[in-house]
Every structure is written in C-alpha cells, then in structure tokens.
Image (spheres, grey):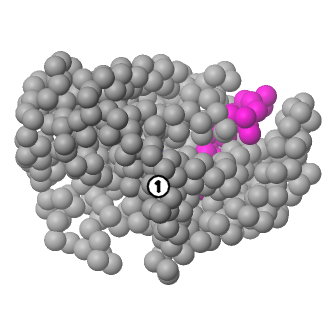
Amino acid sequence: MALTNRHTDGFATRLGVLTATLGSAVGLGNIWKFPYMTGDGGGAAFLIIYLLATLAVGLPVMIGEIMLGREARANAVGTWKNLAPGTPWFLVGAAGVLAAFLIMAFYTDVVGWVFSFIVRAATGQLNSTDPKVGEAAFSAMVSHPWHALFWQWGVLALVGGILLGGVSKGIEKTTKVLMPLLFLMLLAVCVRSLMLPGAAQGLAFLFAPDFSKVTVDVVLNAMGLAFFKLSIGMGTMMTYGSYFRSDADIPLTTARVMLADLVVSLLAGIAIFPAVFNYGLEPTAGPGLLFMTMPAVFSSLPLGQVFMTVFFLLTGIATIGAMLSLFEVPVALFAGSGMMSRKAAVIATALGLAAFGVPATLSFSTLADVSVFGKNFFDLYDFLSSNIILPLGGICICLYAGWVWGGARSHAALSNGGTLANAAVIRVWYALVRYVTPLLVVLVLLKGLKVF
Ligand code: TRP
C-alpha cells in the first residue's frame, strides 16, 4: 500500500491519547443537550436507551473510524485515499471536512456567548434572581452583530493559537491539563447544588425512570445524540486516530472515553437541575437553561457569583477540546496535502472558519429574516451536519470497515497485531459493524430527513 500524506507528529503518551479523545467528546453536548434530553426522555429510562445506543451505534462507529485513521496515518481525506486509492470513498472525508466547517460555525458562536458570560458573571453583571436579567443580557449579546462576532473570532484565535503548537505540544498538552480541571470544577458545583433543599426534586427529574416517555422518537434521538456526543461520522475521530500510538488499545480507549463522557454529562445534570428546582424555575432546554435560568439560580445562592463564574468557566473549558478536534480536521488536511506548512494551515483554517461563522452568528441579528429551506443559517448548518453528514459518514465507515476492509485486517488492527487479548470484543464489534449499526444509522438518517 502506497501511503501518502503521512504525518510525523502524534499523541506522545497513552494518557494523552485518552485526554485528547475525551476532550473531543466532552463539550456543549454534555451541558446543554444531554441533561435536558435525559430529564425530558424519561430519566433513568433514557439513560438505559442512551447506553444501548452508544453500545450498538456510537462505539462501533468510533472504533472503526479511529482504526481506519490509525491504519492510514493520514487526515480525513488522505485516509480514504491511502486505504482505497482511485475510488470515490475519499468523498466521505471531503464531506467530513465540510461538516467541520459547518459545526464550528455555529459551535463557536455559542462558545462565544459562554465566554462573554464568564466575563459578565465574574464582573457581577448577572447578579439577579430574576431570569429576565439573564434574558436581557443574552438578547443584547446575540442581537449585537459586532459583539457576537468579536467573541466568536476571539474563541477561534484562542483555539488556533493552541493548534499552532502542534498535536503533542498543542492538543495533547492542553487537554491533559483541562480535563482534570473540568472534573474538579464540575464536582465543586455538584456538591453545592446537592446541598440545596430542592436537590431531591432535581435528581428525580434527572434519574427517576419513566418508561412511558420512551417513544420511537426518543430512541432515534438518543442514537443521533450518540453521534454528536462522541464526535463521530465526519473525520474528527479519523484524524485523531491517525495520531494514536500504535500500542494504544482502541476498543478500550473508546469505552473509557464513552464512560467518562457519560459521567461528565451526569455531573452536569446534577450541577444544574437540583438548583433549578430549588428555585421553582422551569427546566428548559438549550440557550434558555444556560444563559437565562442558570444566572438566576446562582444569584439566589450564598457565594452565588463565585459558583456562577465557575460554572460558565467550566462550560468554556469543556468546549475547548471539542473545538480543537473540529478545527484540527481541515488543518490536518491542508498541512498534510503538502500545500502549506502547519502554521499556514492553521491561519487559513481560522480565516475560513471566521468567514463561515458570520452567517450563523448573524442569524440572530442582521440576517434574522433570511431563511434557506425554512431555516436560518445557524439551524441550517446544524441540520446539514448533524442530521445528514454525520449519519451518512457513519454508514460509510461501517460499510467500509465491515464489508471492504474486512475481518482479518480489522482483527489485526484492533488487536495491535495480536498483542492484545481482545478477540472476543473484536468479534462482537465486527458483527455489529456489518449487520446492526449501519441499519440503525439508516433509521437515524431517515428520521433526520423527516421521512418519518
Ligand atoms: N462532542 C462534542 C460535544 O458534545 C462536539 C463535537 C466535537 C463534535 N467534535 C465533533 C460533534 C465532531 C460532531 C462531530 O459538544
């Protein structure tokens, strides 16, 4: 096999492999998607469904994607060109790079809001028990075009700056510091939240099993969430896989990442809902919960401003590893194709992302009335990436790994050439990736396209 575009930098330690991959998985999804979907989808009943969805869909795709990346040791497009030269498979990688731009465009918009709220919380601008104060701060921010763009571009500069350091000295080093820090801060807010009188009600919202809420919709949403949560289906994990050490245990690493990511999501739920119920506020979803309800909740607590600042800071910290992994996909492509140096690739990508981000960010101000297919740019980017490219990519990864790449090569790759005693695990993975996972992802895709 003639390998092209191979890179020299990679994750230097096995701990770094874990923190970087976990850093990619942990992000906004844990804090403003997962807890609410759990509460709304039947608490513990949803958790069981989500666990099954990650086992049947998330982990098999993640393992296959990382495996292919490590085998080819190239970027999201180069991997396919190395493994299947002269075939159209590389289009899967090209779609993934497009998805990286689309996701980053709206993701960095929201992260910009978070960072601006860190400053507002720290300077006491959100100290009010009335959710209307958070609401006013939020709408002033999103409706002010330059304000929103300033924060978005600042976030891009920060992430680009880390990526200039490279893979081991940039991504790996940063996530090794941020992941433990995130756990500590999250635990501190959880303890505070659990000490409140209303804690039991919040925990009940999150954990009390209600199987009557589990509909076909909830199951399909859980599978879709597994894609977004685990950063799979668009080449992020393929790119990171190409940086994996040859002695890293891929199935074990993915299982650890999935469990640790789940723990972060549950801790986020424990940090949020007891406090929300304690003050009799509504457990809303998305921006409402994060930017309007949470400031009001914290303002009611003794030392609330400190905890509010820590809360927004930990949310910001959680997003950095996710953004590093998304940003790295085009950087690895541009730098790996020999067109330019890594530094030039980071700058070119940052400029491209800044430009792509403008329509998403202005969806709440200047371009509020512009709609394409009935959606503003923010929602359109989200729809195209989450509902179409991620599931399509997932299907292609399963078909390639399970039916083209095949059993013998997969066994060799996932057992590190026979040095790991994980034959049974690989056999289960192989059966899933051939017969089960792709069919389930087809259902997710059809649901995403609103076929049913
Ligand atoms: N997993 C991250 C989160 O939960 C988001 C993310 C990072 C992502 N990389 C991705 C989503 C790649 C889809 C594809 O916030």
Relative side of 295 to 220, left or right:
left
Q: Which residue is mark 1?
A: 210
Q: Position of residue 70 (x, y in %)?
A: 73, 41
> Is residue 14 positioned above or below 45 on the image?
above
Q: Quadrant of residue 57?
A: bottom right
Q: Quadrant of residue 49?
A: bottom right
Q: Quadrant of residue 90?
A: bottom right
Residue in front for this viewpoint, 116 or 89: 116
Residue in front for this viewpoint, 344 or 43: 43
- The residue under the point 89% across, 42% down is 423
| Residue occupying the far bottom of the picture | 451
Q: Position of residue 203 (x, y in %)?
A: 38, 38
Q: Position of residue 369 (x, y in %)?
A: 16, 71
Give, as a three-letter code, the residue at label 1: Asp
Instruction: Tell me, yes or no, whether the highlighted magenta stretch contains residue 245.
Output: yes
Q: Position of residue 185 (x, y in %)?
A: 37, 22
- From which residue to which does the magenta span run? 231-253
Count all numbered tags in the image, as a single digit: 1
> Is residue 371 positioned above or below 127 on the image?
below
- The residue under the point 52% across, 21% down is 176
Mark 1 lies on a secondary structure that is loop
Q: Is residue 202 visible?
A: yes
Circle 1 crowding by C-alpha within 10 Å: few under 14, some 14–19, many from 20 = some
Relative side of 238 to 180, left or right:
right
- The residue under the point 17% across, 25% down is 301
Q: Is residue 119 visible?
A: no
Instruction: Tell me, yes or no, whether the highlighted magenta stretch contains residue 261.
Output: no
State yes or no: Cβ of the residue under disc 1 lies below 8 Å from any atom of ligand 1: no
